[in-house]
Image (cartoon, rainbow, N blue to C red):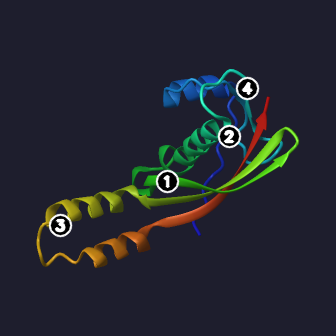
Amino acid sequence: MKEFKEIEAEKDLENFIRVVFNANLKVSGGWGYSKYLATTIEQGNDGSVAQIEFTLATMRAYLEMNMTLSEDERYGAINLNEISRESEGEYEKVAYEISAIKELEYKEFIDEYKEHSENPNFDMNEHFNRRREATLKREVVYWFKLK
């Protein structure tokens, strides 16, 4: 399975998220790779804790799988699905399944679909089977600290 590089902790995670993702989240700490590097979710955020956690996990996935990679290595169509959750005092350990396709391949699939989907000879099943085979799936754990 493809390995992705962990994102280095930011000195000011809240400001980094504001600048890079244009989002205002009251957070601090690291990118949640371990309990020690947990992302602290501060009081005063809009939305539920689960929504904020999902948003942060999505941001980390985009940093790992897209924004920090060369154009030919980038993944797109990145989707997360929560698969488990454990509470340990003020910490939450959440596991997500991430699915994604290399951006260049995804663009080819989309173009193929747009160009041929109206053709009665287009094999829709074969097209979506190839898309499914091209999809990378991985499981990640994200640690959060709740304040």
- Quadrant for the N terminus in the image: bottom right
Q: How far apart in space, not on screen, are marks 2 and 4 (Cα)? A: 20 Å
Residues packed near mark 2 inside 10 Å, few (<14), some (14 to 19) or many (20 plus): few
Give left or right: position of 33 versus 58. right
For image coordinates 57% across by 23% down, the residue present is 24
Instruction: Name the secondary structure under disc 4.
Output: loop
SS category of the residue bearing label 2: loop
Q: Which residue is depicted at the point 73% across and 48% down?
A: 33
* Between 85 and 112, the one nearer to me in the picture: 85
Q: Amino acid at mark 1?
A: Asn
Q: Does 71 sit left or right of 98 as displayed?
A: left
Foreground pick, 69 / 31: 31
Amino acid of disc 2:
Glu
Which sits in the foreground, 123 or 102?
Answer: 123
Q: Mark 3 or mark 2: which is in front?
A: 3
Disc 1 element = strand
Task: First in sequence, mark 3 or 1: give its number.
Answer: 1
| Residue for point 52% across, 24% down | 19
Name the residue located 34 percent from the left edge and 60 percent from the top edge: 106
Identify whether 44 is placed above or below 122.
above
Decide: few, some or many residues near mark 3? Use Cα within 10 Å; few <14, some 14-19, many ≥20.
some
- CA separation in Å, label 2 and label 1: 22 Å
Instruction: Point out the frontmost of discs 2 and 4.
Output: 4
- Expressed as whole percent of the image width and height from the top left, the position of residue 133 reads 42, 74
Identify the residue position indicated by label 2 in the image. 8
SS category of the residue bearing label 3: loop
Per the image, the residue denoted by label 4 is: 42
Q: Identify residue for label 3.
A: 117
Q: Position of residue 37 (x, y in %)?
A: 78, 41
Tell which circle, 4 or 3, labels the residue nearer the N-terminal end. Answer: 4
Question: Which label's residue is closer to the chain start, 1 or 4?
Answer: 4
Residue wearing tag 1 = 79
